[in-house]
Image: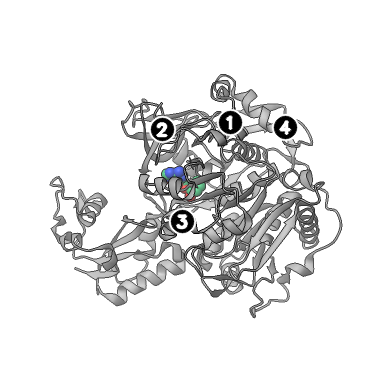
């Protein structure tokens, strides 16, 4: 098999050393998963590993009873000298929590939440920056059986309001403010607007993080430190399929979808992959650079690593602030052993000289969320890892809960930019539109041929979309991922991109339909099309092409402002081009034609006149902005 074989030094010490793990899982997937499940603590064993009688609503570990918070905290609390969380604030403040301290904090917050009416089945929104209270809030909810809905702190009030309302959350845990690139962000003010918009929230719990002045509604708001109640809070005995959390993500429609995850299946999946793919052990310090508010933060900064008993590092601020190489500073200072990040961040730090830092503690690196191009991969492998640190490129989705395709770093050869092979316990195929497997190197639809423990339970309140998006194209037992991919001669998978109108920016999913709808709400806009444009650092930026009544800077800025207001800064367009006409084929806007015109590809097959876009072909990425043609 082609590829770079894992460094021997690494392979010798790895959790998984037996290559038959692939074939064993293939021959007996029940035993494979049950073995990992057996390493967690169950209050009552499951009766049935897998129930597909109500396909496509799959249930795992049926009848089993457990608690995720108990598995992540109580199990390790006995080791009183063991650090669970290392936190670094943007202003270089530092805090650590031992597992015992975390255990106490989770208990006191769980008691506090109960005292304001949170209980089993409650829905609690968490709108918080990367601070330890974010993790403690998740685990406190999990402890009492409340389902948490974590909202990325960078989302606008409007985005947060939508998520709160859609999930029918009655409680919100937020913070007064936080720091980002030297600015104090007034989060409470955004939270207040979100709460007002949603109209479902009864109580708002506020962490005092930044000490900024905030408005306080005495009937509704309460300080986090004032609700804490000392003493033990019994971990609720929960059904394996009790919803642990809902995570919103973008789909091909304008509205984000609430992906609901289970307790048992999800925890087994993230525990198993933390062990096999991230090779985590108790003596590791893992830094997953994602915000807690994304699925990567949930699975590999909280539930996976803590269920193993590792130390997690979380950082509040921007990875390149105040110094563009802060990332290496942090790795060096704490002796990070596993570094899990997005390609965008790797591209950002590529101007740094890693040899100026002692980062020799790093023994494994991982990337996620977007394709990594070979040059970036090779830089990471050579300059950061010094050719002794394996890199796992992990493919998965919010919907899958945890890794699906990747490498087992001690066993699977690495091919720069490939996402590796289906992990043991997963059956993958690349299918044509009719459902037939395509040949090696032929591009097709990436499909997962059999359900697996971390698969979502459903979409919140939207059975129709759940069935239609994921379980219709190839029937109700084959999961349609929405990605194009191909396999090579060794069965390694290469991701080509999304098949739907979803764009990946810095590893975050943005719906182009949502952007178009936002722009269309501006009265001056007559027609609009949003596409992804290649960007050297972020992978993609949003390009908006619009026909408007009064094209120009003013209208362009209206679009920028509205997108920032309705979604957040992450969706800020890189180019807004006003055109007199959009290329169309049979009445539909031909996105491909726009894309080709911008990136400089000429195609003759378009019926309409992409000439109108020709001036854009000469546009350098640095000259993007608001352009009128
Ligand atoms: C989409 C899922 C997985 C957690 C973070 C993103 C893309 C994911 C990779 C990868 C190329 C990737 C896919 C997928 N994607 N991992 N290693 N290489 N593309 O989760 O927001 O649900 O996005 O991200 O297109 O469908 P998400």
| Secondary structure of the residue carrying numbered label 2 | loop
Q: Is residue 393 above or below residue 474?
A: below
Question: Which residue reaches farthest bottom?
Answer: 213
Q: Classify mark 4: residues with Cα within 10 Å, few (<14), some (14-19) or many (20+).
A: some
Question: Which of pointers 2 and 3 indicates the residue nearer the eye?
Answer: 2
Q: Please report the residue visible at 47 percent of the width from the left and 65 percent of the height from the top.
A: 324
Q: Which mark is residue 3?
A: 2
Considering only order in the chain, which callout, 1 or 3, is on the residue closer to the N terminus?
Answer: 1
Where's residue 463, x and y in %?
53, 43
The residue pinned by badge 3 equals 345
Where's residue 563, x and y in %?
41, 66
The residue pinned by badge 1 equals 54
Give the spatial CA distance, label 1 vs label 2. 42 Å
Considering only order in the chain, which callout, 3 or 2, is on the residue closer to the N terminus?
Answer: 2
Considering only order in the chain, which callout, 2 or 1, is on the residue closer to the N terminus?
Answer: 2
Q: Please report the residue visible at 58 percent of the width from the left and 57 percent of the height from the top.
A: 332
Considering only order in the chain, which callout, 2 or 4, is on the residue closer to the N terminus?
Answer: 2
| Secondary structure of the residue carrying numbered label 4 | loop
Pick the quarter of the image with the N terminus. top left
Question: Which of pointers 3 and 4 indicates the residue nearer the eye?
Answer: 3
């Amino acid at each position: 098999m082609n590829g770079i074989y894992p460094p021997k030094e690494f392979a010798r010490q790895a959790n998984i050393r037996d290559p038959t793990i692939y074939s064993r899982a293939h021959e007996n997937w029940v035993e494979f998963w049950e073995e990992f499940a057996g390493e967690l603590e169950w209050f009552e064993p499951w009766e049935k590993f897998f129930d597909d009688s109500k396909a496509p609503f799959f249930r795992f570990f049926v009848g089993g009873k457990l608690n995720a918070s108990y598995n992540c905290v109580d199990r390790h609390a006995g080791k009183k000298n063991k650090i669970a969380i290392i936190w670094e604030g943007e202003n270089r403040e530092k805090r650590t929590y031992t597992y015992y301290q975390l255990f106490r904090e989770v208990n006191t917050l769980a008691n506090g939440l109960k005292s304001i009416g949170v209980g089993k089945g409650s829905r609690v929104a968490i709108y918080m920056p990367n601070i330890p209270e974010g993790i403690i809030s998740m685990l406190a909810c999990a402890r009492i059986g409340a389902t948490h809905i974590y909202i990325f702190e960078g989302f606008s009030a409007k985005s947060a309001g939508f998520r709160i309302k859609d999930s029918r959350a009655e409680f919100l845990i937020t913070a007064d403010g936080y720091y980002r690139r030297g600015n104090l962000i007034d989060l409470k003010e955004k939270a207040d607007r979100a709460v007002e918009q949603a109209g479902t929230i009864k109580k708002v719990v506020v962490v005092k993080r930044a000490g900024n002045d905030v408005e306080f509604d005495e009937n509704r708001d309460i300080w986090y430190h004032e609700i804490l109640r000392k003493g033990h809070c019994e971990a609720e005995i929960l059904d394996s399929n009790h919803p642990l959390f809902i995570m919103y993500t973008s789909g091909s429609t304008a509205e984000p979808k609430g992906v609901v995850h289970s307790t048992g299946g999800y925890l087994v999946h993230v525990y198993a992959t933390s062990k096999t793919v991230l090779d985590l052990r108790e003596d590791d310090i893992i830094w997953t650079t994602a915000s807690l508010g994304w699925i990567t933060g949930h699975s590999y900064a909280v539930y996976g690593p803590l269920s193993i008993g590792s130390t997690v590092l979380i950082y509040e601020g921007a990875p390149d602030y105040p110094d563009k190489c802060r990332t290496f500073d942090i790795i060096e200072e704490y002796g990070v052993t596993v570094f899990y990040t997005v390609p965008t961040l790797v591209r950002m730090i590529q101007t740094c000289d890693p040899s100026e830092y002692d980062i020799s503690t790093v023994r494994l690196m991982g990337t996620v969320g977007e394709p990594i191009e070979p040059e970036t991969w090779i830089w990471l492998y050579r300059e950061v890892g010094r050719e002794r640190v394996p890199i796992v490129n992990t493919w998965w989705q919010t919907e899958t809960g945890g890794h699906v395709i990747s490498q087992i770093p001690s066993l699977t050869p690495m091919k720069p930019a490939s996402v590796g092979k289906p992990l043991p316990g997963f059956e993958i195929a690349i299918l044509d539109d009719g459902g037939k497997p395509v040949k090696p190197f032929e591009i097709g639809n990436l499909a997962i041929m059999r359900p697996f423990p971390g698969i979502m339970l459903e979409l919140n309140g939207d059975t129709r979309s759940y069935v239609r998006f994921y379980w219709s194209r190839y029937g109700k037992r084959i999961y349609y991922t929405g990605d194009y991919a191909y396999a090579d001669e060794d069965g390694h998978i290469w991701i080509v991109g999304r098949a739907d109108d979803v764009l990946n920016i810095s590893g975050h999913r943005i719906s182009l339909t949502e952007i178009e709808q936002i722009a269309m709400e501006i009265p001056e806009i007559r027609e609009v099309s949003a596409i992804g444009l290649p960007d050297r650092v972020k992978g993609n930026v949003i390009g908006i092409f619009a026909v408007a009544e009064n094209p120009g800077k003013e209208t362009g800025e209206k679009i920028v402002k509205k997108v920032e207001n309705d979604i957040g800064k992450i969706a800020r367009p890189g180019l807004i081009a006003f055109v007199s006409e959009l290329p169309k084929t049979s009445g539909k806007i031909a996105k491909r034609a726009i894309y080709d015109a911008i990136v400089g590809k000429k195609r003759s097959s378009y019926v309409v006149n992409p000439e109108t876009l020709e001036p854009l072909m000469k546009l350098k990425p640095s000259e993007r902005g608001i352009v009128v043609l």
